[in-house]
Image (cartoon, rainbow, N blue to C red):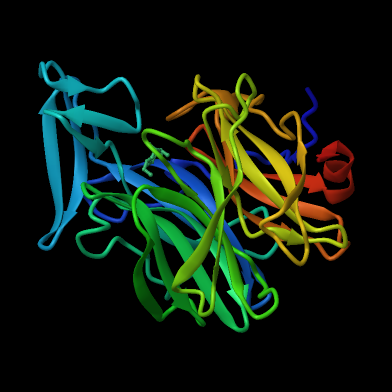
Amino acid sequence: MKDIAKRFPQNPLLSPSDLLPSHESLQIACLLNPGVFQFEGKTWMIVRVAERPIQKDDAISFPILTEAGIEIMEIHSNHPELDASDARVINYIGADYLTTLSHLRLLCSDDGVLFYQPKDYSILIGQGLLESFGIEDCRVSYIEGIYYLTYTAVSPNGVGVGLRTTIDWKNFESHGMILPPHNKDCAVFDEKINGLFYALHRPSSIAIGGNYIWMASSLDGIHWANHQCILKTRKGSWDSARIGAGASPIKTEEGWLAIYHGANEKHQYCLGAFLMDLENPSKVIARTEDPIMSPTENYELAGFFGNVVFTNGHILNPDGDTVTIYYGASDEFVCGAEFSIKEIFSLLQYY
Ligand code: MAN
């Protein structure tokens, strides 16, 4: 198995203690899965900040957004109807809750390594009944002067894809939920193809079907149609349980190159790549067999939820070959790594 990621020696770039919590009653448990974009000559991240109260020894407590603001739920650890075997989600009296509440925060950097929170930019928090468990894992696409933010919207109603747009990162227009539950990992292409917007997304079927990558197109970038299933999990492989797109695919002469995450039954998250036809992107023409990146470093193996590398943000460098990915490690830290597109291509197997 070949890991071709060149990790930043400065990793992790960001840890929970590097930022201040959004509320005095909370602490930051995880900084993860940033969307990445360029704006006003700088590299920016819209990072997922997952918060919860300081935990007591004998209880689990987590915040929920209500109309009145943040409400804290506290459950005794010994409660007979509590299943807390997953650090990320709990089941309590038959209902699922997240153990943390996520918002999105803007950070910027002059060198792509040192990120800081600029003044005068607000945090983005969940709005309304479909985002009461938070907003997560934002992808940013830039199309014809508008930034499209597609993110995971979580609530007791389910997990879906929300969309907000902006031109200045200060004023946002909310378009509500564009892909209903269960759906996440939505990445809009940075460019229209033959007049249409395209997006990768990941619905999940609970009975027939699975956690596969789908493609949709749209006339306006808001209403999506023509859904097609384009990439599936592979039995017995590193991507056997679920797959999902990373950031917007990269346009190359040979096709649209997508970096995606895959997890196996043991919840190990690795990265792979696939290539879509330039004119007809719902046609996948090649895919890597093995991961191009797997959790190997301490910060990728142990943390809030260990054994995870997950990316939803990258920058294509001016040399046209180097992609800098920013990624969540162990669902707790933000890290950086570089890939060579040529090297990724050398591992693609054409169908
Ligand atoms: C999964 C994980 C969590 C995330 C929830 C809701 O359990 O990806 O990190 O909070 O889904 O999206």
The part of the image, by quadrant, that contains residue 171 is bottom left
Residue at horizontal 76 percent and vertical 36 percent from the top: 288
Residue 129 position, x and y percent, is 20, 60
Which of 130 and 209 lies nearest the eye of the viewer? 209
Which of 17 and 108 lies nearest the eye of the viewer? 108
Q: Is residue 231 visible?
A: yes
Image: 60 above or below 66: above
Residue at horizontal 79 percent and vertical 45 percent from the top: 339
Q: Is residue 103 visible?
A: no
Residue 336 position, x and y percent, is 67, 45
Image: 24 above or below 119: above
Residue 96 position, x and y percent, is 22, 35
Which of 326 and 217 lies nearest the eye of the viewer? 217
Work out which quarter of the rendered image holds the N terminus and state it: top right
The part of the image, by quadrant, that contains residue 193 is bottom right
The part of the image, by quadrant, that contains residue 52 is top left
Work out which quarter of the rendered image holds the C terminus and state it: top right
Q: Determine whether, in the image, residue 16 is placed left or right of residue 327.
A: left
Q: Determine whether, in the image, residue 345 is placed left or right of residue 37.
A: right
Residue at horizontal 10 percent and vertical 16 percent from the top: 80
Residue at horizontal 23 percent and vertical 38 percent from the top: 97
